[in-house]
Image: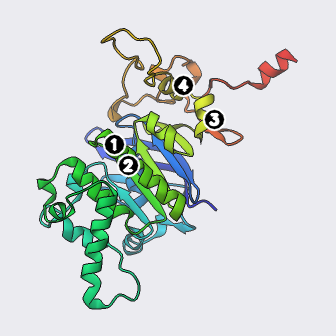
Amino acid sequence: MPLLDIRNLTIELNTPHGKVKALERISLTLNVGEIQGLVGESGSGRSLLAKAIIGLSEPNWTVNADRLMFDGKNLMTMSNRERRALMGKHIAMVFQDPTGSFDPANDVGSQLLEVMPVPKGTPFWRRHSERKKQAEKWLHKVGIKNTKEVMDSYAWELSDGECQKAMIAMAIANKPQLLIADEPTTNMEASTRAQIFRLLNQLNQLQNVSILLISHELENLTKWCNTLTVIYCGQIAESGPTSKIMEKPFHPYTRTLLAHLPNAEQQVAHKSMMQTMPGSIPALQHLPIGCRLGPRCPKAERKCVNQPLIAKDKDRNFACHFPFNRETDNDANSRS
């Protein structure tokens, strides 16, 4: 049984222009002990999906799903109190906006101490000191050297990178079953990024923590993730094992992303422009009908005005009428 099982999740937003589907028929499965990457451009709906999982919906949201299960429990039928009981201990999240996620009226240290675990059998008069030791230990693990200074500071006194590290320490201290990391290494230097990814990988390998890693940096996801899910403008484009997607992408969007990865061995003229996909992701109030990649897709045809259903090929899923690297039955028959 998968740890996280989502089937046909749709999120509609009430806007001044009427209702728009920010996410449409999203299906995602995350197994125990798996690191899955969720990649897409800014505005593709990745953070909306993460917030829907942990129950942080806004008043103007309408969330519908055929299935939204965590560890065999139906998240759609849970009360707010039951949902909150899962947070922190069983499901934790690293938010994309670190500074805005802390309470500005309290120092970072007091907020860290609230979630720090205490070893069983600890006398009550030593619990505060034990929590403080745990907080300093986890802050040091995520790359913060001046732990006392950070704990005594307010979030608005710290840099975005320091707030991000403190949030990561808060999220992983209880070793949750599921960790959702939304752009966890934003505003960090390269050495610290590598340290954070190694720490997350260590949690996965030693504590069997399942991780949903959200990012727009495809190169990093391909290094650390077992499986990969590509999302475009609120629709799933492709999902499957990372190695197989890297070798033979089916969806045109995935193929374009991989083709435009920076390559140090490629001979490029000095100060030349990097290759990009033509066009831009459409605004929510002007979404194209059918496949939302249609206006930018090199293989788009009249059939693409109908939304493609999720097709399966062994352990791969994709949503495209005209996929790459896949032989159709007609092609196979013509050669036989």
Q: Amino acid at mark 1?
A: Ser
**Figure check: 310 above or below 201:** above
The residue beneath circle 2 is 195
Left or right of residue 306, residue 175 in this image: left
- Image spot of residue 325 (x, y percent): 66, 24
Graded by Cα atoms within 10 Å as few (under 14), some (14 to 19) or many (20 or more), the crowding at tag 2 reads some
Q: Residue furthest top?
A: 269
Label drawn at residue 244: 3
Q: Is residue 312 above or below residue 133?
A: above
Task: Kindly identify which residue carries mark 4.
Answer: 255
Image-quadrant location for residue 100? bottom left
Q: Residues within 10 Å of mark 4 (few under 14, many from 20)?
A: some
Q: In what element is the residue under mark 2?
A: helix
Few, some or many C-alpha atoms within 10 Å of disc 3 (few <14, some 14-19, many ≥20)?
Answer: some
Residue under the image location 14 percent in, 65 percent down: 152
For label 1, the residue is 191
- Specify which label sits upstream in the sequence, 3 or 1: 1
- Callout in the foreground (3, 1): 1
Q: Is residue 272 above or below residue 136?
A: above
Q: Secondary structure at mark 4?
A: helix
